[in-house]
Image: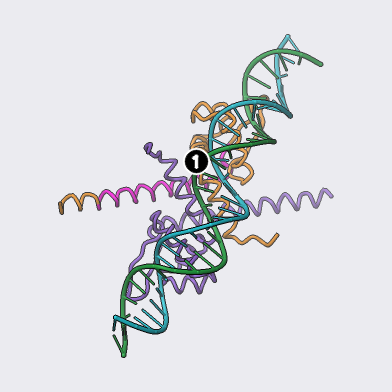
Chain colours: A purple, B orange, C green, D cyan
Amino acid sequence: MSPRSIFDMQAELCKTMGNAARLQIVHTLRGGPHRVSDIVEVTGLAQAKVSQHLGVLRAYGIVATKREGKDVIYRIANSKLTRVCDLMREVLAEQASERSEVFEALQRKG
Amino acid sequence: MSPRSIFDMQAELCKTMGNAARLQIVHTLRGGPHRVSDIVEVTGLAQAKVSQHLGVLRAYGIVATKREGKDVIYRIANSKLTRVCDLMREVLAEQASERSEVFEALQRKG
DNA sequence: GCGAGATATTTGAATTTGCGAATATCTCGC
DNA sequence: GCGAGATATTCGCAAATTCAAATATCTCGC
């Protein structure tokens, strides 16, 4: 395989975060480490799906795990990732407010 | 269409950034606004490809444009997005250094 | 209005990805 | 070792994504 550029690696990281179910899981883990069963309960996603996505997140180093008896505890591997999510939401919020400004301006013009 | 959740929107934003060519373009624009032809030159990507990806980036509000005669000037729409990219690269760097620590530890153990 | 430079769009094939359903694996207490 | 709870994996398929190549559109100067 050809040597992957930093852009390839960053693209993979983005793609890994580019799924609503996975983002929902990551968001759940913001509040601290959780067992898989708790993630299933909080998100309302099917168990197999949660496990699948956790597997992807772990493969890309976004979450880390430890086993505790029957349970497996997941946590966000790097707190900078929560900051990334926060910033993205801020961007989305700003995009939305810009859109509503445009909308209101159009309203005024009739 | 069903109301899209914040997770859906964030996932779209992530997916939009989840392409090496687009990240390369965004990285080029870090240095300030550029004409399309300059982006083509800096990145070494084909013109049609750059234009295609710029279209995607613009559709999702990641870049903004203005026309100047024959040229079209692109810029990053929200500086928080450059911060997002920086943070992601930091995460990747930390992942790499963790991997090399593991590697070295394994070396020592033989 | 035409030619040339600059940018954008369309098309079709190849690859990747997400999902549901079924099933497998692990761990504990007995 | 078995059953049950908890978690992980596999499979087949539909849908989305990417790329290269061809072509279309826009803008200017003449």
Does the magenta-highlighted stretch encompass residue B58? no
Secondary structure under tag 1 reads: helix
Image quarter where the N terminus of chain B lies is bottom right
Count of labels in the image: 1
- The part of the image, by quadrant, that contains residue A1 is top left
Name the residue: 36% across, 65% down: A65
Q: Position of residue D5 (x, y in %)?
A: 42, 80
Counting from the top left corner in percent of width and height, residue D17 is at: 56, 45
Q: Is residue B94 above or below residue A42?
A: above
The secondary structure that most of the magenta stretch takes on is helix
Q: Chain of mark 1?
A: B
In the displayed structure image, the side of residue C5 where residue A85 appears, left or right: left
- Judge whether residue B97 is colored magenta: yes
x, y percent for residue C13: 58, 37
Tell me where residue A42 appears, x and y as whole percent: 51, 72
Span colored in magenta: B75-102
Query: B54 left or right of A100?
Result: left
Q: Amino acid at mark 1?
A: Leu
Q: Image point 43% across, 58% down: which residue?
A: A57
Question: Which of D24/B65 is in front?
Answer: D24
Q: Label 1: which residue? A: B23
Q: Residue at x 76, y 49 (%)?
A: A105
Looking at the image, which residue is at 37% across and 37% down? Answer: A3
Identify whether B42 is placed above or below A22. above
Compare residues B80 and B53 and report the one nearer the observer: B53
Circle 1 Cα neighbour tier, 10 Å, few/some/many (<14 / 14–19 / ≥20): many
Answer with left or right where residue B34 lies relative to residue B96.
Answer: right
Residue B8 placement, left or right of A8: right
